[in-house]
Amino acid sequence: MCRSIKTLRPPYVEDATGEDVRAAALQYVRKISGFRAPSRANAEAFEHAVDQIAAATQHLLDHLHVKPTA
């Protein structure tokens, strides 16, 4: 879907930062909304969506069980 969203779990990224997670959430919201930057009327909904998706993404990354590589 979004080629610019990178895999954020090990072994691809050892330690994804909050900035990495938010950047991925922002790319996702931009893609599905069709807006690179929202209008003032949509800014609050846009930012809320980014925050919610970033939180869900961080929760997922925090709870994934990844097999160690040899």
Image (cartoon, grey):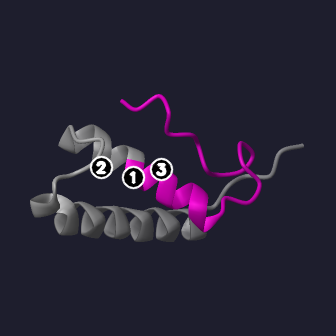
The spot of residue 27 in percent (x, y) is 40, 45
The reply, left or right, for residue 42 in relation to residue 27 is left
Q: Which amino acid does label 2 sit on?
A: Val
| Disc 1 and disc 3 in contact, CB within 8 angstroms | yes
Q: Is residue 27 above or below residue 59?
A: above
Q: Residue furthest right?
A: 70
| Disc 1 and disc 2 in contact, CB within 8 angstroms | yes
Circle 3: element type: helix
Residue designated by label 2: 29
Q: Residues within 10 Å of mark 2 (few under 14, many from 20)?
A: some
The spot of residue 7 in percent (x, y) is 58, 42
Q: How far apart are marks 1 and 3 (CA)?
A: 5 Å
Q: Is residue 2 above or below residue 27?
A: above
Magenta stretch bounds: 1-26
Q: Which mark is residue 24?
A: 3
Q: How many numbered circles does the render carry? A: 3
Circle 1: element type: helix
Residue designated by label 1: 26
Q: How far apart are marks 3 and 2 (CA)?
A: 9 Å
The reply, left or right, for residue 15 in relation to residue 38 is right
Which quarter shows the N terminus?
top left
The spot of residue 42 in percent (x, y) is 14, 59
